[in-house]
Amino acid sequence: MCNMKITMGSLFLVLLAVSGIAVLVGNADAKVAMPERENVQTFVWVTEFITFITALAIAVFVWRISKRDSKNKRSKQDKS
């Protein structure tokens, strides 16, 4: 159960960091001219999408490891 709390806490911090990118988008939009803004916006959207997918993949990976670990722990307890 302790591992799940650590996992959820870590997942929360990762998602918080990913959501912080939205603040940077607003700053980038305010500093460039209109034709450049579209290129920057496209780059930012692609970067945000890749970051979100990466965070999701890490969360699923950690979840699967914790699930397997808890299953192994239960099987060891059943054998005892």
Image: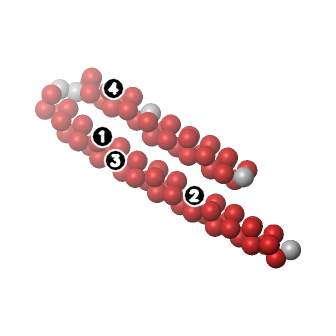
- Tags 3 and 1 in contact by the CB under 8 Å rule? no
Q: Residues within 10 Å of mark 1 (few under 14, many from 20)?
A: some
Residue occupied by mark 2: 63
**Amino acid type, callout 2:** Trp
State left or right for residue 58 relative to residue 5: left
Identify the element where label 3 is drawn.
helix
**Amino acid type, callout 4:** Asn
Q: Residue at x 64, y 67 (%)?
A: 68
x and y percentages locating residue 25 in the rendered image? 33, 31
x and y percentages locating residue 39 in the rendered image? 19, 39
x and y percentages locating residue 65 in the rendered image? 61, 63
Q: Residue at x 27, y 23 (%)?
A: 30
Residue occupied by mark 4: 27
Report how far apart the C-alphas of labels 2 and 3 lie in the structure. 21 Å
Identify the element where label 1 is drawn.
helix
Report how far apart the C-alphas of labels 3 and 1 lie in the structure. 8 Å
> Which of the marked residues, 1 or 2, is nearer the chain's N terminus?
1
Report how far apart the C-alphas of labels 4 and 2 lie in the structure. 34 Å
> Which of the marked residues, 3 or 4, is nearer the chain's N terminus?
4
> Which of the marked residues, 3 or 1, is nearer the chain's N terminus?
1
| Residue 12 placement: quadrant | top right
Residue occupied by mark 3: 49
State the residue lying farthest toward the left.
Answer: 35
Tell me the colour scheme of the image: secondary structure
Q: Residues within 10 Å of mark 4 (few under 14, many from 20)?
A: few
Between circles 3 and 4, the one closer to the viewer is 3
Report how far apart the C-alphas of labels 3 and 4 lie in the structure. 18 Å
Residue occupied by mark 1: 44
Q: Which quadrant does the C terminus fall into?
A: bottom right
Identify the element where label 2 is drawn.
helix
